[in-house]
Amino acid sequence: MADRTQDTALYSSTQILRRTQRRHLTPAGLFGQVIKYVLLIVLAISFALPFYWMASSALKDDSQIYSVPPKWIPNPAHWNNFWDAWNVRNFSQFSINTIFQYAIPSTIGTVLSSAFIAYGFARIRWPGRDTLFFICIMTMMVPFQVLMVPLFIIFKELNWINSYRPLVVPAFLGSPFFIFMLRQFFMTIPQELSDAARIDGASEFGILFRVILPLSRPALTVVALFTFIGAWNDYLGPLIYINKMEMMPIALGVQELQRAVNETGTNPMVYPHLMAVSTIITVPIVIFFFLAQRTFIEGISLTGLKG
Amino acid sequence: MKKLSRREFLRVGATVAAGATLAPYIAQADEAVVSNAPAARQGVTIQYWPSWSNFPPAWEKMVETDEYKEFVGDNTVEVKTGTPWEAVLTAIAAGTPPDAVSNYQYLDLMARGVLRPIDDWVAASEYFKKELYFEGSWNDGFYQGVMYGAPGIEGFLRYGLNYNAKMVEDAGLDPDNPPQTWEGCLEWHEALTKFDDAGNLTQMGLDPYDAMGGQIAIQDGFYPPVSWGWKWFDADAGTFNIANDMMIEAFDVMGEFYRIAGPDNVAGIRSVEGQGGWGGSFNASVQAMIIEGYWHPGETIIQKPEVGQYNRATWAPVPTAREGAKVQGTGGHYVVFFKDAANTEPMFKIAEFFQTDTACQILFEDVGWLPARIPFIEKTDPSAFPGLEFYFDSVTEATEWSSPARCPITAYVSQQYQELREKVFRDELSAADAAAEFQTRCEDEYKMAGF
Amino acid sequence: MTLQRWGLRPKYRNLLLGLIFISPWLIGFIVFTIYPLISSLYYSLHRYDLLRPPVFLGLDNYITFFTDKSHTPVVVYNTLYYVVLSAPLGVVSAFLLAGLLNTQIKGRSVFRAIFFFPAIVPAIVTAQIWRFLLNVQYGAVNGALQGLGLSTIPFLSNPDLSKPSLILIHMWAQGNAMLIFLATLQDVPRSLYEAATVDGANGWHKFRYITIPMCSPVILFNLIMAFIGGFQNFTLPWLISGGTGGPNQSTEFYSIHLYRRAFQNLHMGYASAMAWILFVVIVAFTVILFRSSGRWVYYGGAAE
């Protein structure tokens, strides 16, 4: 109940805002505004705090890390930690591997194939469709651990071990999660739009590319974003398939660093280094998100349907 | 019109991108096959996976030596550290194991027939001779009469109570008069365990479940049988002897250390990075005592000289009723070879290289490790690291010797021990019930694993 | 005759088309899911330790799971506790954040980014940060509590608090679901709200009768994903507890136990049986959710 009340407040504040724009701010409206921004700022602080902790820990030395009570501002700040940490392991190589061998190819593959497959599940009526779709969803529920060994044997037979193929090729065969998501999006697009295109002589491919995809750009952006981030952060997959240090992706590099902390006691500066690398690898994702969010969030509204 | 053409462009662009992305993968597959051929002529690539993360610096030094070049010949060795156990398993199951590994669950591997017996190689070797090794360490390379493990990398004595003399002095205790029994340890523990004003633990005396006192999944099992002096597993009969008075006493006596410091507090202090791992809290000077092997003095000096300089070692604690018993143990590590691997024979040469004085010296100086190889031990300076001398003396002074039980479910036993002891010190289960449960779990598992 | 043909042809044409569209998935499904699944079903009926050949046991592994008193009860309890609380709370937290962001606010892109960030940090990093932040002795959160003169809270080292702490971390990392909600909220036609305003509806009415129905397919989607994720919850508790499921087995969830049985104790067959049991439970849960969803999920232009 509490959450609903809160949301009501949010929605009435939308109302209030409209009035605000007309520059007739009532005292109640002002109060609502203040509450909203206080809420936003408190939430923002609690969301950002762990990252502040990460970034500030990256600037500390060991005695500052383990000080009681904890120090919020590292003084003196050890800026060279970033450079040192990046070179403790070959993180430059790891990031190149992750981006070009894994993240970009699997993003392209997932977006294309998932949209294609979702169209077959959402916009064409054919016998057995719903059964197959249900099966498709069910595959998401299979715990990965069970598939791990048989999959490893398949990829070994294909001679794909120690390459990114076990991670990239399946991306071109669609991901159930994104198929499901895109299907949900596609289904909210009125059938009349497809029918109209069909009457104009468009093929199903034409409808997918000219009607559905342009309307689903935000959804596709989400798929791309999630896949890219997923690949950037993935460590269970590469852990099994990639044995060569020079081929490692970045998440495995971080894990290597973390293992070094745990296994060999306190090597000097390992925790600050871990945090420094964590900070560095978070930055590209943040930039990526900033670039993509406009397209994603504001790209479309269904009001276009009226036309 | 403008819109349409952009969409067309996107579509074409996407198709081209997909093709371009897939192309290198298809090309790569061919390359992989081709590149194998010339490699075979120049020598082979040996895969060796020791799990220790502190091994690589020593390894980098070893490969620079002339001896190494002699032993390796035209081949190259790829060393991969930190591989998780599950990745090792998947690789074996898929038929692509490395040539050899070290520091994994040896008994699990030996008992399941995936290792290559090395009796023939050892018989022909001028380096591996039974009389050159500590008997216990040599014997633990065998399973049911067949030799699988070539002793190597590290293998000297396993037990001692190490303590930080400075912390001990600061607490008003006498570092020259260390405790010999659990009772004595508990007194020190109480004096060394400190809380801040808010009741938070800031320092503890002894975490009896850290390092060699804790779960030792690789092969040693668990510590109470060493301290109380009994055999928990009979390999010939396949029976467990766990639900006994000694185990019950051990649960209570060792659990008391946690009750004093507070279970949540200990979990907290030991869960931050750097203090959680094996021995980490001793290095961080938040734990004053630790039950550890001979490697502790060297590793601590190398990793944390400012702490290592105060290290001292004495006999690992025994129950008061057994005061005067001086317990020590053999064990250590091996290089084990996989049946299905291609280059085990050249890898065996590398295992031989690990027996050379050159390799042993590098491991000793750079990591702090000693082999189970008597000729090298005899040459080693016992005063090289503070506290190491105790272990050298204990070779002749120990009254009881233990070696790891040859139990093929040792990893499981360690895991249950860890779970049940926590239930005891958190007062959820009585020590007697825990011991009975421990026995039942082990018996069930032994059957379930098909032994 | 003609009518019949008219009736049949599009059906087969559509079947063919449909199969063409889903063919990539079908290939992947057969090769990368069906085959491994059948292997695992086979293993679940055997004693299989990965290293020795499987030995047939019949249903023993399944029976062992249901009769095991030492681990099954605690593992099932932990998992249900986590799933039942974390899935709805996570969805609510994501929905509220999205709702807040969907109002007209200054600096929206900054707030949006901040709320989203937790989702994009690798789990391995998240685990390190939270382990340290929530630590009793060194953690900043407890440091702040102490600074305020309050007593410290052993978030992750007390068996009673470890699961709630994990749920809190889960609610904090809802960026993905939040973005999906946000996109959905922005797709709700303005005209609907405008029409409702003309009809004199207040904020609550609009939320109840426009926002929720329009978002319901996505709520269902996120809820199902949260349930599946909850049942399979592995990475974060695994990393935070250092692979032990501690303290005192309080974070030993189903997947963690399964993983330990499979890879630490080499009971691949038993773990496969556990995985199949989990699979059936998740499918049952999802079917129930889907069945019940007919009453509250609204598809705008659905083909059905």
Image (spheres, grey):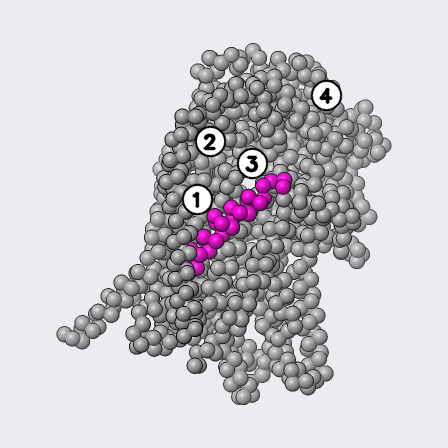
The residue pinned by badge 1 equals: A148
Magenta-colored stretch includes residue C84: no
Identify residue type, mark 3.
Gly
Mark 1 belongs to which subunit? A
The answer to which of marks 4 and 2 sits earlier in the sequence is 2
The residue identified by callout 4 is B384
> Residue C171 location, x and y as percent?
60, 60
From the viewer's perspective, tell me whether residue A52 is left or right of residue C101.
right
Q: Residues within 10 Å of mark 3 (few under 14, many from 20)?
A: some
At label 4, counting other C-alpha atoms closer than 10 Å, the crowd grade (few under 14, some 14-19, many 20 or more) is some
Q: CA distance from mark 4 to mark 1?
A: 47 Å
Q: Which mark is residue B98?
A: 2
The chain holding disc 2 is B
Q: Are marks 4 and 2 on the same chain?
A: yes
* Residue type at numbered disc 4: Ala
| Image quadrant containing the C terminus of chain C | bottom left
| Residue C179 position in % (x across, y down) | 54, 65
Q: Quadrant of residue B397?
A: top right
Q: CA distance from mark 1 to mark 2?
A: 19 Å
Q: Do the CB atoms of the residues marked 3 and 1 lie less than 8 Å apart?
A: no
Q: Height in image: C291 above or below B159?
A: below
Look at discs 4 and 1 and give the one toward the viewer: 4
Report the side of A23 relative to B419 (left or right): right
Q: Report whether mark 2 lies on the same chain as mark 3.
A: yes
| Mark 1, other Cα within 10 Å: few <14 / some 14–19 / many ≥20 | some
Visible residue check, residue A273:
no
Disc 3 and disc 4 on one polypeptide chain? yes
What separation in Å lies between label 3 and label 4 (alpha carbons)? 28 Å
Q: Position of residue C157 (x, y in %)?
A: 66, 47
- Which residue corresponds to mark 3? B82
* Range of residues picked out in magenta: A87-113
Q: What label sits on residue B148 in the rendered view?
A: none
